[in-house]
Image: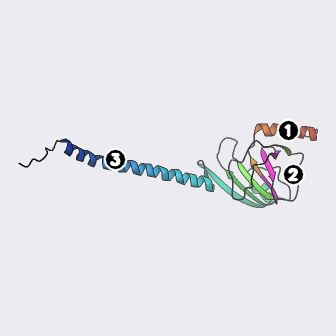
Amino acid sequence: MNREPHPTSRQTVRKKGALRTRPLRTLLLAAALGAVAIIGLLAVLNVTGLFRFGHPMSSTTYASKAELIKSWDKTAPWLPDDATHIQIKEVKQYGPNYDPAILRAASHDALNATVCARTARLTHPTFTASWSPDTDVPTVYVCGEWDVIPTADGWFGWTKNSPQEQAAAAAVLARTHPTQK
C-alpha cells in the first residue's frame, strides 16, 4: 500500500512555509543591500566633498584678493594683499552663522600682526581638499574666526575656530597692540 502524505502534514506545511518566506528573505536582502549601497554612496560623496553630511559644498578659485573681495560673500581679513591663486572650499547652509570654509592662497607677505596672533591650535578644519596641507601642528595664527597656518607658498586657513582660541589670541593682541580694540 502506497501512502501519500496528507496535504496538511508537517512535510507539506514546511514546503509551503519555505515557499512563502523566500520572497520575504529576498526582499529583506535587497533592502539591506540597498541601504549599504546608499551609505556607501553618501560616504563617497562626503569624502570627495560633493556633499558634507547632506549640506552642499562649493569650491571656488580667485586670481587675487581684489577679485575675492568683489565676488565672495564671506571675508578673510587675514589674507595678505599680495594673495593670488586663492582656492576656497566651503559648506553652505551648515547652520546659523556657521558655514565652515577652508582657504589656501599663494603669498609672500606676512600676516597682519594687528589682526592675527599665534596661539595653541585647538581645532582642525571641518573638512579637507586635495590642496589642504597637514593641519596637525601645535600652533596656529588666530585671525578672528579663522585659524591660519603657513604653507610652502603662502597660507592656509579654516573657519570656524574655537572661542578659547579667539580669547587666547585677543589676550596676545591686547599685550602686543594695546591701542587696538
Q: Is residue 142 magenta?
A: yes
Q: Residues within 10 Å of mark 3 (few under 14, many from 20)?
A: few
Residue 85: x and y in percent read 78, 62
Reading the image, the residue beneath label 3 is 24
Sequence-wise first label, 3 or 1 = 3
Whether the magenta-drawn stretch holds residue 108 is answered as no
Structural distance between the alpha carbons of marks 2 and 3 = 64 Å
For label 1, the residue is: 170
Residue 86, how many percent across, how many down? 77, 59
- Give how far apart the Cα atoms at labels 2 and 1 are: 16 Å
Q: Earlier in the sequence, mark 2 or mark 1?
A: 2
- By what rule are the colours in the image chosen? rainbow
Q: Which label's residue is closer to the chain start, 2 or 3?
A: 3
Magenta residues, start to end: 136-156
The residue under label 2 is 111
Q: Is residue 20 left or right of residue 59?
A: left
